[in-house]
Image (tube, rainbow, N blue to C red):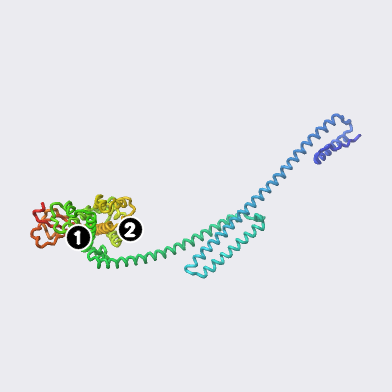
Amino acid sequence: MESYRLEPPSKLGTLAWSFNKIFHLHRHVASSAASACSIPDEDAYSIHKSKLSQNFSDSSTILLEDLNGFYKDKHQKQQESSFVKEKEAMEFFVANLFARISAIKASYVQLQLAQSPYDPDMIQSSDLAIVTELKQVSELKRTYFKNQLVIPHPDCDPNRAFAAQIEEQRNLITTYRITIDKLTTDLKIKDSESLTLQDELLEAEKKNRVLDSKLHPGRSFSALDDLHPSGLNSTHFLTFLRCTFKSIQSFVKVMEKEMESSGWDLNAAATAIQPEVLQWKKPEHRTSAFESFVCGKMFSNFHHKSFNVDASEGRLMWSFPEFFQEFTQLRCVEQIQKLSQHSAILSFIRAKYLELVHQKMEESFFGSLNHRAVLSSGQGFPNSTFFKQFVEMARGVWLLHCLFFSFKQDSDQSIFQVRRGSRFSEVYMESVVQDDKASNKRSAVGFTVVPGFKVCSTLIQCKVFLSPADQCP
């Protein structure tokens, strides 16, 4: 039997050639075992050999492409894994750096806190902590520049970055707690200083009131120092009423000076207030007319808890302790700037000024309506002697109103005045004109200067101007 040796086709891969050789060897053994078999046709064999060569060539190309793709994917995955590790290492480096910085900050704040009050042990421990943290920062810097962008450690744990971030937050919390403790200590010191200054202020105001009582007898409120609701009685109200009337008289004097400076006819002005009553033989008579005009405006709506002021409507629900508390607070407040911090009395002062001082009067006194403009704008108080005296008077009336409602509600308080032409009664009235020669003739009331009050079953006389009965219709 003739045997054939097949040469491997050209341009075939090693794997394809081996497979082809095994295939023909198996075919040759099969042909030798069959004695009846004839020699295969050369043309058929050539066709078969050509197809087999083509199939193995295609298979080899596919296998090579798969192998290249496999190695390519493996290389790409290795690059991605390396990038992730480098990123994790960098995150850990940055987190650790910020953790160290926050620790330095916390230790530095602790060092500042130990300066006052001086604590040597805390200073030493804080200084040591700062030095330790600085060394760690220096080590991070050395590692960074030595390893370029921080070569990742094979055993680098990604959770270490989160641990460093947690440490940073803990250091920040420590810093905030130390700062809060420092601010709390400073606040306590400031509160203590404030209480000390308040005591000094009260003592200075008390001394000022004593000096004021010596300088202006009858105008000081020092008689009401250390007053308590349980000891409040009508005598205190009468004392304060007299002080308030003194402030009204002082304002009227300032107003008369402004009238004279502006060229007013004082007799004509007094006659316009109380016509057909006064003879104006004496200056104090027309002064009484001006005082009656001022008191009429200032004591209007005195019997209302809110004084009929829009901003004081909430006072309608007040009880007597609340009125006494406000009286106590405002009694020692004399500066205009401090009074402006209380909205109720501020609204009262604004309303009474606009009611008492007419536009023509203000323009005549000051040449403009600047006082009204400043009050209407709510930007404060005008700076003039006239207005300061008005504020002092308004303050006294407001405090008298607070004291009036500081008595218990069942004490039957009231305010009253006497009509013109009423018969004079020493029980209810007190004459403001001291003229013994005309005492028999002045038997009728010309007008009420200051209203009277009834407090705790005690009657406080009203001040009246007496005129001859034939001049009082």
Residue 135 appears anywhere in the view = yes
Circle count: 2
Outermost residue on the right side: it is 1
Horizontal and vertical percent position of residue 427: 13, 60
- According to the picture, the residue beneath numbered tag 2 turns out to be 337
Residue 456 circle label: 1
Write the residue at 36% across / 65% down: 197
Q: Which type of secondary structure does the marked residue at label 1 adopt? A: loop
Left-right relation of 411 to 103: left
Write the residue at 86% across / 29% down: 43
Q: Residues within 10 Å of mark 1 (few under 14, many from 20)?
A: some
* Circle 1: residue type: Cys
Horizontal and vertical percent position of residue 355: 24, 51
Q: How far apart are the alpha carbons under marks 1 and 2?
A: 35 Å
Is 166 in front, or is 191?
191
Left-right relation of 332 to 37: left
Q: Which type of secondary structure does the marked residue at label 2 adopt? A: helix
* Circle 2: residue type: Gln
- Mark 1 and mark 2 lie on one chain; the one further toward the N terminus is 2
Write the residue at 77% across / 38% down: 60
